[in-house]
Image: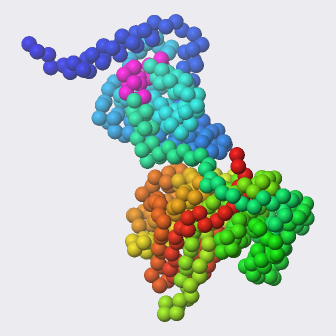
Amino acid sequence: MQSTRPRGRSWVSRLDRYLLGHVSSLPGGNHDAFFRRLSASANQGKLWIGTAAVLALFPGKTRRAAVHGLIAQGVASAVTNVVFKTLLPRTRPLPEHLPVFRFVHPQPTSSSMPSGHSASAVAFAVGAGLVRPALGIALAPAALGVAYSRVHTGAHWPSDVLFGSALGAGAALVTRHWWPVRPPIPQTTRAWTSAPALPGGEGLSIVVNTLGGSFKEETASALQEVFPKSHINIVQPDEDLVQRINATADHPGTLALGVWGGDGTVGAAAAVAVERSIPLLVLPGGTLNHFARDAGTGSLKEAVAAAGKGEAALADVGLVTAERGLAGNPEISQLIMLNTSSVGIYPNLVRRREHLQPALGKPLAGVVAMFRTFAAGTPTTLSVDGVPHKVWIAYLGRGRFYPRDHAPLIRPVMDDGVLDVRLITADESFARLRLLWSVLTGTVASSRITHLREATEVRIDAGGAPMALAVDGEALAGVRKVAYEVRPKALTYYSPRP
């Protein structure tokens, strides 16, 4: 007569008893106490939560690896304990299968299949390793040790541990689907061109904004020392900045325009340089030195070297056309955009981040600033290229910025011919919770609330209501419509060759 006993389960059970018999035959020793303690340390995920807390002290990839490990562990634990332990009830090993002195006490009463400890351990190690492989390798012995300890202490059968470990690895890989690896930052490239060499600053006229960037009393004398033959124009707080920049560019014998100041000052100088077809030397005078850093003149030494040798490249610029005032009698303003522009609450976020950064560091300051800003802010209703959205942030960068999330920092290519368009919307249900969760987990770039694309032209319409617009850090109030376009290779800027 044919047996109705499930052959798969019988085969697994026989293999489990065979393997457990080998574990039972191991001599006793200090390793028994070690595996009991290791197993106990992983109860309720305490070992991995503590490990993540230590890793979180180190910014960058290590911190993101810790967060991803915890998320993968949470998913694995939920799937294992809520789903599979209910679907696969199984009795745990009995004292007859192992020496009594090895048994974990008290023995768990839930289903033996699968092992939750193993699932959590493997999920944390694999999840962290997907972000930082070296860290995953370092965590692997601890994860494997926890998994084995569940067999050594009689808490699980070997197949429970194998199935739990597979669930843990699967959870880490599944979470990676919505936690994608950040795309690699491309190599820095330049569209090299010729520009006048300015030894000692000869032929260079520099405008210095006393209200912009990191100006100090000794700034002018320091510039005069490194550019002794240059003409330096100091703009006082009560003077018209654009007028003084034009006067500086019109100084007799000017071959190139230099600028010291913040992003707004640099943008105004770039507009003048483009209009006159003269090269621009951006000096590291801004608080964050966005363009100077991307141009390779993030230090005064680099700027002096590039200007002295006449090393230069071409950059695209953005042309921003803003419509303000009454609908029947609009006021049109045109601005040159070198770096970024935004609509919505992004300026508030940046101000909060910069305020918190000295105490918390940039990554953590960005997270805290996002929470504070979006907890108190409200979305703006906009039409972007004819598509209506409720928008937290509409961000446009002149060129592709990296990383591809809410905090772009680096622009390795200055002439790629595109606008980097990033919308964080409130169109979806539970938009605020989605946003705060994506910020906490570092998944803004892959969240459904984030829309990333590239364009050469963008139109934003507030539907008659005024909106707050910022261009290279300078705010324009009462804007109703704004249009962006790219002017390819319109600016010549000094940049040191490698």
Given residues 266 and 396, the one toward you in this image is 266
Could you tell me which residue is drawn at 69 percent across and 61 percent down?
493
Place residue 311 in its image quadrant. Answer: bottom right
Total label count?
0
Q: Which residues are magenta?
A: 152-165
Task: Please state if 308 lies on the left or on the right of 375 as rendered.
Answer: right
Confirm whether residue 41 shows in the render: no
Q: Is residue 445 magenta?
A: no
Residue 6, position in %: x, y? 20, 21
**In the rendered view, would you say 173 is above or below 326?**
above
Could you tell me which residue is drawn at 55 percent across and 68 percent down?
487
Confirm whether residue 79 shows in the render: yes
Residue 315, position in %: x, y? 62, 61
- Judged from this view, the residue extending furthest toward the left is 1
**In the rendered view, would you say 396 is above or below 26?**
below
Q: Magenta segment, principal secondary structure?
A: helix
Given residues 39 and 67, the one toward you in this image is 67
Given residues 96 and 448, the one toward you in this image is 448
Residue 388, position in %: x, y? 40, 73
Q: Is residue 156 magenta?
A: yes
- Judged from this view, the residue extending furthest toward the bottom is 328
Place residue 291 in its image quadrant. Answer: bottom right
Residue 278, position in %: x, y? 70, 68
Place residue 273 in its image quadrant. Answer: bottom right
Could you tell me which residue is drawn at 61 percent across and 55 percent down?
191
**In the rendered view, would you say 279 is above or below 161?**
below
Which of the colour schemes (rainbow, by chain, secondary structure, one colour) is used?
A: rainbow
Quadrant in which the N terminus is drawn: top left
Given residues 480 and 129, the one toward you in this image is 480
Could you tell me which residue is drawn at 47 percent across and 17 percent down?
152
